[in-house]
Image (spheres, grey):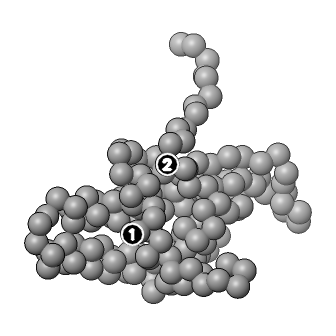
Amino acid sequence: MRHRKSGRVLGRKPQHRRAMFRNMAAELFAHERISTTVAKAKELRPIAEKMVSIAKRATAKADGVEDEKLKKAFLLHARRRLIQELGGKRTVVVGEDAIDVISKVLNDLAPRYHGRPGGYTRIMKRTQRRLGDAAPLAFIELLKATEEKVRRKGKAK
């Protein structure tokens, strides 16, 4: 029985699963949209949103402080926490460019979501299925600055 056990195993050992989600998060931050299975996307969402929250909180703290040393300390602490979460995966090659994922999260994504209380990602299910095992596929993407999540209307209760 799986009572009170959270998270999906996805047929992997814990170390493999952790490494897979770190790589997927780095790719998501670099490309801002990736395609994967629905189950992996649903498991990746809280991981990615926690990383954005870490950066957002640090930049908000740094903006509210006058002392330069304290500002640098807040941002350095956030940078080190993000490096720890991503497992040292700092650069992703996109075409011919190498993107520093940590800097992108701290400098681009944190200010983008400054006034947003959460919900930085969107999962859109695709109609296609994966060849081979017919697993349902989905896109997971980071929302734009002014974009809002649209919820489907459910049955009236």
Q: Nearer the viewer, residue 52 or 75?
A: 75
Is residue 1 something one can see in this rendering?
A: no
- Residue kind at label 2, given as amino acid type: Ala
Q: Nearer the viewer, residue 129 or 142?
A: 142
Residue at screen point 63% across, 67% down: 31
The disc at residue 129 is none
Q: Quadrant of residue 70?
A: bottom left
Is residue 29 something one can see in this rendering?
A: yes
Residue at screen point 44% across, 55% down: 112
Look at the picture and state if 82 lies above or below 153.
below
Query: What x and y, as percent, mark residue 135?
Result: 78, 57
Identify residue for label 2. Answer: 145
Residue at screen point 61% across, 55% down: 141
Identify residue for label 1. Answer: 106
Query: What x and y, as percent, mark residue 147?
Result: 54, 42
Crowd around label 1: few <14 · some 14–19 · many ≥20 (10 Å): many
Please state if 47 lies on the left or on the right of 13 as rendered: left
Q: Quadrant of residue 24?
A: bottom right
Residue lying at the far left in this picture: please name it: 67
Instruction: Give the structural element (helix, strand or loop) at label 2.
Output: loop
Instruction: Give the structural element (helix, strand or loop) at label 1.
Output: helix
Residue lying at the far right in this picture: please name it: 131
Query: What x and y, as percent, mark residue 124?
Result: 68, 46
- Residue kind at label 1, given as amino acid type: Leu
Crowd around label 2: few <14 · some 14–19 · many ≥20 (10 Å): some
- Measured in 3D between alpha carbons, the distance from the residue under mark 2 to the one under mark 1, in whole angstroms, is 15 Å
Please state if 123 lies on the left or on the right of 69 as rendered: right
